[in-house]
């Protein structure tokens, strides 16, 4: 038996054969966490002496590394620390680094001076609580949090003051800034081994032979890791890989950036010099985001096909970080200053733009609105198009199909998606921020509009849910939805009360309960052939059927039957593993809905990303059947008028547009 400890005091017990190799245990843990970038992590063995920490060797049998007496305790930890957090490709990997460093600083394992600790704590609070609000964050709101051992009296005030300066930073950006600040600590990434000094210039002795062997192995492993020539590529499905934003050319991943040259030295920066000249219209053909005013580096967000940026050698790629423009350091430039500097290159005598870039510096910063420069003109949907048009063109879907296909090939669909407002101006969300309702929100930065929220009967009327109505022109009626977050342990009763009061007969669940070690949704239904009580409602699960992609459950709630459909093959912030399965699932949702005018309850984890994709897809299917024009981004805008931030990421938007185009081809 093996007892594993993770971050946030989480534990896992496993039963394996001791004759198994260490790699088998590592693989089980990595699969449990759904971890893609695995090379950075390992399992640390807890020996009798706290001074003698060993790592599990994947190439040796477990029985040779552990004690004979069970249970054997191991800790999941970061084994290899990168000097630049932008080299970590996955947001989830950065999140695990973030948890590790928080834990090490709190325990005193990683010494941290007070001024640096206050800055790190302010980023951690921004990631946890979101933007500072004077009405919500009253004096002492940090008292329940622990950041460092034995904090001084004025520490909380200093953290609160810094927290106010981080308004607008998403959780992912806050965690990235945390890692960047932590990487400058003196003992960041340093593994300490205790030795006894000897009266010799270079010699020293260890406590015992095992300690000596451990330090030798640590040196060899670190030396090997940072000299890797090519890491193992992460396993991704074809569908997810096809819609990954970034360079269309393969590049070495984060470990590959550390490959050494023939002299054995590790490059300090791996920078690339790119030169290009504008076209006849004075354009270079790329967009940037970030800037000093946004507390973000300057990142290339889009490269238009066939433009100077696309055709130059070496090519400029999406995700590249711009370090110098025509020899100027732009680290202190605002976004607008950078755009003007790029455009001013056309006025030079040579007209040449010279960029020094760090290849693929940051990937998919998708939690905040991305500000693009205005080089490109977008011609994807007409300004006047909308779902409420009083008249329609015959076979309007054919012309919209051509626009959609052009938008996908040129990339303008993604650029225009980035320019959509995430929250409708003027819509308030004050009810979600009331003290009695804060604990009912799964994510602090995702709240329902007051005007369209679902109001429960009774004194406690709040649930994180909005009505969304999608009108189908041409006599197609109105498709009614309730978009909500995945229930929490304390809101399951509210969820069933909402379903009862709204006469819902269909619930569509678009998440698994746990993804990559994070709880995404509490199980709000009983197991098959069992009955459960939820806030006064008795719910029975009569049957369960499906396939590896999705499940259908027949639930009886008091005297009313309800069908729950769960789609499982769809990772958070990703795309469905198989577009055919997803289209079949949406068709099944439509058949289960039938002609019912009651709202369909749709939820994922936050109730905005995957939920928005499904609503858009069903709406598009209805429009196509009615020979109406289909403008996906217009549908997104209509949804965001009723619930904020519907469809979060460009990856989801591109996948959705592709799936709609596939359905259009089949329909044609």
Image (tube, rainbow, N blue to C red):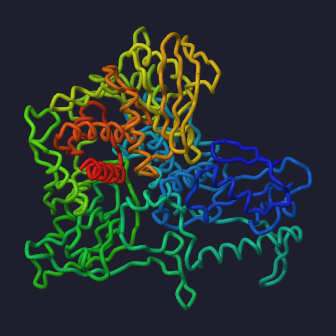
Q: Position of residue 153 (x, y in %)?
A: 55, 38
Toward the bottom, the furthest residue is: 263
Residue 431 in the figure: left or right of residue 492: left
Which of these two is toward me, 21 or 565?
565
Q: Residue at x 55, y 11 (%)?
A: 536
Q: Residue at x 56, y 72 (%)?
A: 231
Residue 61 in the figure: left or right of residue 367: right
Residue 595 visible here: yes
Which of these two is toward me, 538 or 551?
551
Which of these two is toward me, 140 or 34?
34
Residue 588 in the figure: left or right of residue 277: right
User: Eyeballing the image, is 115 above or below 267?
Assistant: above
Q: Position of residue 24 (x, y in %)?
A: 73, 59
For the image shown, how many numbered marks are present on the structure?
Answer: 0
User: Eyeballing the image, is 94 above or below 392?
Assistant: below
Residue 227 in the figure: left or right of residue 271: right
Q: Residue at x 73, y 63 (%)?
A: 23
Residue 153 visible here: no
Q: Position of residue 235 (x, y in %)?
A: 54, 62
Q: Quadrant of residue 639?
A: top left
Q: Residue at x 86, y 68 (%)?
A: 210
Q: Quadrant of residue 515?
A: top right
Q: Quadrant of residue 636?
A: top left
């Amino acid at each position: 038996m093996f007892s594993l400890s993770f971050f946030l005091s989480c534990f896992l017990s496993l039963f394996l054969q001791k004759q198994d190799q260490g790699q088998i245990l590592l693989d089980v843990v990595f699969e449990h966490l759904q971890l893609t970038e695995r090379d950075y992590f390992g399992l640390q063995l807890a020996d009798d002496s706290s001074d003698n920490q060993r790592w599990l060797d994947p190439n040796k049998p477990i029985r040779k590394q552990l004690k004979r007496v069970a249970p054997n305790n191991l800790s999941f930890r970061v084994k290899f620390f990168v000097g630049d957090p932008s080299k970590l490709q996955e947001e989830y990997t950065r999140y695990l680094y973030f948890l590790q460093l928080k834990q090490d600083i709190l325990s005193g394992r990683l010494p941290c001076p007070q001024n640096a600790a206050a800055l790190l704590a302010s980023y951690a609070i921004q990631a946890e609580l979101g933007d500072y609000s004077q009405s919500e964050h009253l004096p002492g709101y940090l008292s329940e949090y622990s950041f460092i051992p034995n904090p001084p009296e004025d520490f909380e005030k200093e953290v609160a003051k810094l927290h106010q300066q981080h308004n607008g930073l998403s959780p992912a950006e806050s965690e990235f800034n945390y890692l960047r600040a932590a990487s400058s600590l003196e003992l960041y990434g340093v593994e300490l081994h205790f030795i006894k000094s000897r009266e010799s210039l270079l010699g020293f002795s260890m406590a015992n032979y095992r300690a000596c062997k451990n330090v030798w192995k640590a040196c060899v492993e670190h030396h090997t890791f940072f000299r890797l020539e090519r890491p193992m590529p992460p396993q991704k499905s074809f569908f997810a890989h096809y819609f990954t934003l970034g360079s269309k050319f393969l590049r070495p991943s984060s470990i590959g950036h550390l490959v050494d040259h023939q002299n054995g030295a590790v490059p300090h920066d791996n920078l690339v010099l790119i030169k290009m000249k504008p076209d006849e219209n004075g354009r270079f053909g790329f967009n940037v985001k970030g800037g000093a005013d946004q507390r973000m580096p300057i990142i290339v967000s889009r490269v238009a096909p066939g433009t100077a940026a696309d055709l130059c050698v070496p090519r400029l790629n999406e995700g590249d970080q711009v370090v110098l423009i025509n020899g100027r350091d732009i680290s202190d430039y605002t976004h607008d200053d950078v755009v003007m500097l790029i455009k001013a290159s056309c006025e030079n005598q040579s007209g040449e733009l010279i960029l020094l870039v760090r290849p693929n510096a940051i990937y998919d910063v998708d939690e905040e609105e991305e500000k693009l420069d205005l080089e490109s003109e977008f011609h994807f949907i007409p300004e006047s198009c909308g779902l409420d048009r009083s008249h329609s063109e015959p076979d309007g879907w054919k012309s919209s199909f051509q626009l959609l296909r052009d938008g996908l090939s040129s990339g303008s669909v993604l650029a225009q998606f980035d320019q959509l407002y995430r929250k409708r101006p003027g819509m308030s969300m004050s009810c979600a921020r009331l003290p009695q309702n804060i604990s009912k929100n799964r994510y602090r930065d995702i709240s329902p509009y007051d005007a369209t929220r679902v109001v429960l009967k009774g004194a406690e009327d709040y649930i994180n849910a909005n009505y969304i109505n999608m009108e189908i022109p041409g006599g197609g009626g109105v498709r009614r939805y309730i978009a909500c977050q995945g229930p929490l342990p304390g809101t399951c009763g509210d969820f069933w009360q909402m379903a009862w009061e709204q006469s819902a007969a269909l619930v569509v669940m678009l998440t698994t309960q746990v993804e990559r070690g994070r709880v995404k949704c509490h199980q709000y239904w009983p197991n098959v052939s069992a009955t459960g009580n939820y806030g006064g409602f008795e719910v029975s699960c009569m049957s369960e059927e499906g396939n590896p992609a999705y499940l259908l459950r027949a639930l009886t709630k008091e005297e009313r039957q309800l069908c729950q459909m769960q789609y499982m093959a769809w990772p958070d912030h990703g795309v469905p593993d198989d577009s055919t399965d997803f289209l079949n699932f949406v068709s099944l949702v439509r058949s289960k809905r039938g002609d019912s005018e009651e709202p369909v309850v749709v939820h994922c984890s936050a109730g905005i990303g995957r939920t928005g994709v499904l609503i858009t897809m069903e709406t598009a299917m209805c429009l196509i059947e009615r020979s109406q024009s289909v403008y996906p981004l217009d549908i997104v805008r209509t949804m965001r008028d009723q619930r904020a931030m519907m469809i979060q990421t460009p990856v989801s938007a591109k996948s959705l547009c592709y799936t709609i185009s596939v359905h259009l081809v089949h329909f044609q």
